[in-house]
Image (tube, rainbow, N blue to C red):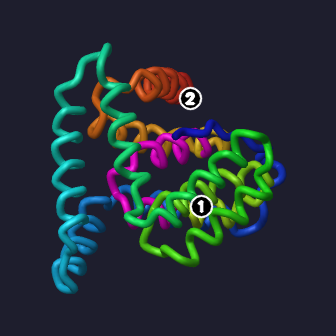
Amino acid sequence: MFFVLYFDVADRPSGADRQVRYIGFMVMHTHHFKCTVTAFLLGVGFSLPALAQEATLDELYQNLQAADEATYQRVERQIVTEWEKSGSAAMDLLLRRGQDSLESGHPDAAVEHFSALVDHAPEFSEGYYGRATGYYLLGMIGPALADIGETLRLNPRHFEAMRALAMILQEMEQPDNALELYEMVLAISPQSAEAKQALEFLRMELEGQAL
């Protein structure tokens, strides 16, 4: 599930620039994070369901690489469906309640549901991603950026979090960083129309600034 977020840059709290730079650095090193997380998980041992889900996701990401303009969105939805499987019926219920609250226009209730999810399943990236959306809608930019950072730490291939962060960086007038994020999205989902359009716009903007 992907939520489009907008906010007034003038309302940005002090310290948000440092957080954006931190997150920008982090997402530019997703390969390193993936290797680190993988090494840790191998050290403590995978469960069989986790291994099966990872294998399914690897296959889906391969399908996404080969998808065309007519099929890539379907594959992306399949990947999101896998992301949203926590392995616990109770946690899945909290996730759905949070998403339902966002869709019904109640970000404050969504933050409560997602906070409960994060508390009970701190290694489940979708809890942080959903809560980030709620925080943005409430104008709480700093906490939202921190949750996007956690999302990408736990799931370095989370193209939806990358797209959302790229849009936010555009709003914050950081086109160079936004462009790099959209390029990362296209490395995962080469047919992403949104990323392609944004890249074209940003390149034209940057060329105009260079003149």
Local secondary structure at mark 2: helix
As drawn, the residue found furthest toward the bottom would be 44
Amino acid type of disc 1?
A: Leu
Name the mark on residue 47. Answer: none
Look at 67% across and 40% down and name the residue there. Answer: 5
Look at 34% across and 49% down and name the residue there. Answer: 82
Look at 25% across and 65% down and name the residue there. Answer: 50
As drawn, the residue found furthest toward the right would be 11
Of residue 139 and residue 117, the one placed in the foreground of this image is: 117
Q: Where are the magenta residues, as a range?
A: 149-168
Question: Is residue 4 found left or right of 92 in the rendered image?
Answer: right
Question: Is residue 100 found left or right of 13 in the rendered image?
Answer: left
Local secondary structure at mark 1: helix
For disc 1, the marked residue is 94
Instruction: Determine whether 194 is above or below 127 in the image.
Output: above
- Where's residue 46, x and y in %? 20, 75
- Where's residue 39, x and y in %? 19, 77
Q: Main secondary structure of the magenta part?
A: helix
Question: Is residue 22 found left or right of 35 in the rendered image?
Answer: right
Of the residues tagged 1 and 2, which is closer to the observer?
1
Look at 46% across and 20% down and name the residue there. Answer: 197
Of residue 121 and residue 149, the one placed in the foreground of this image is: 121
For disc 2, the marked residue is 209
Confirm whether the magenta stretch covers residue 169: no
